[in-house]
């Protein structure tokens, strides 16, 4: 007798049906109606296909017993029905979230699994619900793989090899640390970790980082105060229930680097996973004598999904960076303006020279960050989330600034002032964000993602400095009372190993407190993937108070700050978009949280005689016209944008000689006050225009690229203060902005040569950066443009082990990252050539 066997997929359905009927109480030797239909369909199909060859078919089907007459469902049926109902919102939530990568278990969950250089989503999915290709904003995302191929172990290393971002230094009483300029505007207090502001300037490690998102252009609607040129969001590593993995990376470098990182994810059960990581580093800095860079840290993250509609994540991060700081090299400024100046290493000084004091200078930067986030899927269309963050950051250092060189003939006999810079700053933050995301379709045909949120931030900082910095009066010319050494040789610093006593804190710190209550609403309306409308509004109640212990001085201010954004995206094709966007932001006084100078965004409690110097917020506006396209099977993202950002009511500083001269400018000082009196005014304006190009992803299956080109033109459009150098520039108006590279380019690329070998490299270009005060390039100082080239080669030993060789700054280019804003600046020198071997284990 011939017999036709049903295909495997149909047999599976039949088996499922049989199992279900068994659980429902139907037993006996029979097949269900579904199984009978499957068999019949199989027979019919086989008969049609083989009419001439197929022998007669007999299907042995026992008689089906009648179903029970009871109408009440059994407990098994109830459980099955409830499971289906619970699965519906989870399925919709998974469709809205980034897809789980099909590659390694530790892959970036936001990136394209087939092209890890290309990121499809940012972390803030509710605020930016569309894919990046359909988001009306320039966003550059450094994925996990990009960070690894750049060998970027700190945020500074990652950012400085990205177009459109430059580094600043610690002017005006601000802390030395991660101070970035995005599209020409200071963003040192616009750095976020998982969407929560990381207040106070710090130095940030990358061992706990999943990806780095650079959101360009004003964004107070998304982020709160500040964000004139853009913001940086650090996305941390989270525990995943997808799979357990065990990773270790060990690094050895020519600059005496020894570094080990661990990253372990353990799935406890299908609802719970724990991820832990660790860091150890002992290192010097290539090309810089005496400078050390030691680090240690750990993180732990958990993910718990007790039900299909509830997800709770938590993490704790601890980092501690210690060593001997590097405040750069002195700047050669000739007495005649006809001769170009520049950093002293360009005029014969040894590039390795360090002008600090081994027995005095140190730094310790620490962070402790704890976060709990809970998400509840109320319905398939409504999700409520609550995020709580508590953190403490410390900046503790004494460093030496090589300033005010005295030029003599011969130049090699020149001296400088080695001036101490110290700080002990503790910043505590408590933040709570509650958001509701609601998805619905309207009658017109738009698919909406509506987000509303309430945020409370409590920020507290204590800023002190050290005394006793001249306690080494043992040899040579005495130090000044402030701890400065005034006869240090520029070409051969001779006091490096002087003995020092133990410094102490002044005990009179400046206390700064900021409380902000915010409400915001945003909507993204998508019409059949043809037209996308985007808009949002945010209202911040911002209050600040500052005082100095032991001093009667105290200042406070409160501002109610509204901001909004609008965007229109048109999709001429499924893989491309064209958009126009408009956004505003505001910088209230004190927004740069680490500042103790009003001129640099702080609030100074020590101003005498009612000289409050409190002005209204600086107002920023931006318009952007851009296009984005996914090419090569949608594995490569190309972006292009034209932008213009303006700032109004900007603050300026000017020096006046007496209280009488300060009065007309609104500065109140006691009668008879003379000397270097600083008066702050408001009313300046700036403008930056430019083009922003970006690329990320794969051109072929073996060739990956990531990079960008940013060209900018900046101008001071209004100024009430005189130029810092009237001989060169009679006025600030018309001058470009200082501290930024108006042209910048970067390109990271790699090619898979074989199944074992990959070869890659990076090129970085920065144009000349001008010095000046209060952003105007008005000092006549600058650091030169440069090209820098890196390379790497990777070998996969087997499925678990790989080795990678990096050579940074292949041609040993002498270049500089930033210069201090003063008439006698010092310059931050970049590392010289260095090579690293990284051995990685993946299990």
Image: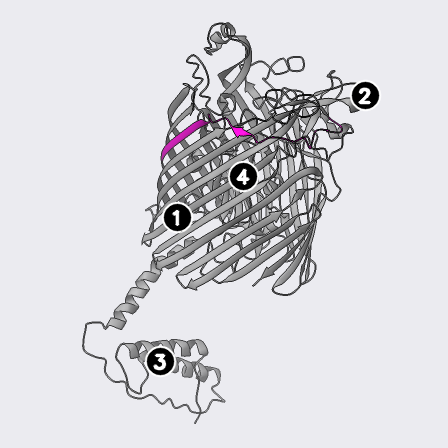
> For the residue carrying disc 3, how many other residues have a C-alpha within 10 Å: few (<14), some (14-19), or many (20+)?
many
Q: Nearer the viewer, residue 768 or 621?
A: 768
Instruction: Tell me which numbered mark, 2 or 4, is placed earlier along the sequence.
Output: 4
Q: Nearer the viewer, residue 272 or 583?
A: 272
Mark 2 vs mark 3, foreground winner is: 2
Can you give x and y, in whole percent of width and height, for residue 387 in the image? 38, 45
Can you give x and y, in whole percent of width and height, for residue 277 in the image? 52, 53
Q: Residue at label 1? A: 372
Q: Residue at label 4? A: 365
Q: Secondary structure at mark 3?
A: helix
Q: Residue at label 3? A: 35
Magenta span main SS: loop
Q: CA distance from mark 4 to mark 1?
A: 24 Å
Q: Secondary structure at mark 4?
A: strand
Instruction: Tell me which numbered mark, 1 or 2, is placed earlier along the sequence.
Output: 1
Label for residue 410? 2
The boundaries of the magenta stretch are 490-518
Q: CA distance from mark 3 to mark 1?
A: 50 Å
Mark 1 vs mark 2, foreground winner is: 2
């Amino acid at each position: 007798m011939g017999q036709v066997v049903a295909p495997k997929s149909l047999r599976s359905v039949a088996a499922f049906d049989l199992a279900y009927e068994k659980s429902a109480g139907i037993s006996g030797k029979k097949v269900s109606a579904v199984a009978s239909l499957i068999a019949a369909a199989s027979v019919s199909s086989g008969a049609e296909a083989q009419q001439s060859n197929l022998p007669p078919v007999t299907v042995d089907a026992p008689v089906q017993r009648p179903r029970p007459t009871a109408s009440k469902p059994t407990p098994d049926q109830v459980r099955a029905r409830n499971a289906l109902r619970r699965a519906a919102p989870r399925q919709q939530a998974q469709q809205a979230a980034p897809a789980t990568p099909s590659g390694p278990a530790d892959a970036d969950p936001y990136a394209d699994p087939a092209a890890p250089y290309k990121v499809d989503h940012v972390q803030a999915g509710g605020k930016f619900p569309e894919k990046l290709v359909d988001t009306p904003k320039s966003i550059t995302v450094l994925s996990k793989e990009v960070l690894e191929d750049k060998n970027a172990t700190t945020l500074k290393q990652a950012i400085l090899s990205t177009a459109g971002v430059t580094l600043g230094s610690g002017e005006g009483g601000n802390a030395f640390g991660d101070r970035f300029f995005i599209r020409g505007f200071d963003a040192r207090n616009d750095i976020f970790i998982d969407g929560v502001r990381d207040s106070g300037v710090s130095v940030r490690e990358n061992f706990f980082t999943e990806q780095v998102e650079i959101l360009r252009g004003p964004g107070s609607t998304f982020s709160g105060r500040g964000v004139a040129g853009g913001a940086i969001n650090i996305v941390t590593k989270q525990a995943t229930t997808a799979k357990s993995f065990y990773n270790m990376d060990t690094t050895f470098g020519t600059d005496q680097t020894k570094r080990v990182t661990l990253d372990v994810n353990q799935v406890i059960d299908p609802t719970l996973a724990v991820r832990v990581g660790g860091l150890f580093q002992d290192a010097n800095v290539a090309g810089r004598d005496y400078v050390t860079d030691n680090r240690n840290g750990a993180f732990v993250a958990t993910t718990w999904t007790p039900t299909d509609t509830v997800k709770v994540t938590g993490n704790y991060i601890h980092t501690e960076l210690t060593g001997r700081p590097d405040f750069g090299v002195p700047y050669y400024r000739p007495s005649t303006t006809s001769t170009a100046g520049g950093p002293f290493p360009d005029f014969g000084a040894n590039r390795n020279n360090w002008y600090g004091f081994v027995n005095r200078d140190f730094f310790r930067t620490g962070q402790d960050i704890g976060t709990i986030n809970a998400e509840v899927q109320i319905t398939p269309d409504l999700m409520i989330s609550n995020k709580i963050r508590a953190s403490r950051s410390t900046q503790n250092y004494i460093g030496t600034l090589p300033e005010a060189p005295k030029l003599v003939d011969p130049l090699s006999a020149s001296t400088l002032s080695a001036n101490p810079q110290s700080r002990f700053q503790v910043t505590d933050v408590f933040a709570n964000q509650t958001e509701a995301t609601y998805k619905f379709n309207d009658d017109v045909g738009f698919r909406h993602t509506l987000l509303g949120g309430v945020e409370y931030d409590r920020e507290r900082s204590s800023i002190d400095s050290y005394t006793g910095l001249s306690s080494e009066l043992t040899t040579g010319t005495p130090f000044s009372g402030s701890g400065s050494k005034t006869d240090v040789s520029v070409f051969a610093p001779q006091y490096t190993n002087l003995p020092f006593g133990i410094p102490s804190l002044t005990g009179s710190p400046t206390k700064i407190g900021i409380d902000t209550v915010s409400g915001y609403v945003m909507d993204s309306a998508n019409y059949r993937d043809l037209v996308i409308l985007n808009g949002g509004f945010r209202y911040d109640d911002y209050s600040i108070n500052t005082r100095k212990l032991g001093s009667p001085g105290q200042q406070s201010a409160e501002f109610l700050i509204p901001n909004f954004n609008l965007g229109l995206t048109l999709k001429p094709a499924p893989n491309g978009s064209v958009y126009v966007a408009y956004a505003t932001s505001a910088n209230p006084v004190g927004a740069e949280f680490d500042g103790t100078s009003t001129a640099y965004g702080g609030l100074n409690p020590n101003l005498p005689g009612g000289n409050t110097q409190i002005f209204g917020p600086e107002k920023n506006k931006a318009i952007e016209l851009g296009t984005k396209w996914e090419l090569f099977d949608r594995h490569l993202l190309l972006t292009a944008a034209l932008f213009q950002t303006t700032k109004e009511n900007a603050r300026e500083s000017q020096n006046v000689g007496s209280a009488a001269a300060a009065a007309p400018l609104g500065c109140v000082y006691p009668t008879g006050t003379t000397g270097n009196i600083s008066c702050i005014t408001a009313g300046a304006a700036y403008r930056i225009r430019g083009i922003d190009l970006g690329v990320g992803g794969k051109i072929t299956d073996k060739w990956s690229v990531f990079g960008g080109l940013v060209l900018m033109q900046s101008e001071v459009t209004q100024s009430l203060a005189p130029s810092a150098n009237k001989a060169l520039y009679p006025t600030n108006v018309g001058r470009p902005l200082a501290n930024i590279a108006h042209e910048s380019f970067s390109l990271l690329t790699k090619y898979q040569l074989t199944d074992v070998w990959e070869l890659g490299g990076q090129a970085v270009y920065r144009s000349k950066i001008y010095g000046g005060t209060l952003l105007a390039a008005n000092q006549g100082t600058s650091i030169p443009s440069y090209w820098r080239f890196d390379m790497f080669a990777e070998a996969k030993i087997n499925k678990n082990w790989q080795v990678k060789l990096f050579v940074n700054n292949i041609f040993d280019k002498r270049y500089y990252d930033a210069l201090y804003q003063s008439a006698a600046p010092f310059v931050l020198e970049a590392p010289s050539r260095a090579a690293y071997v990284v051995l990685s284990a993946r299990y």
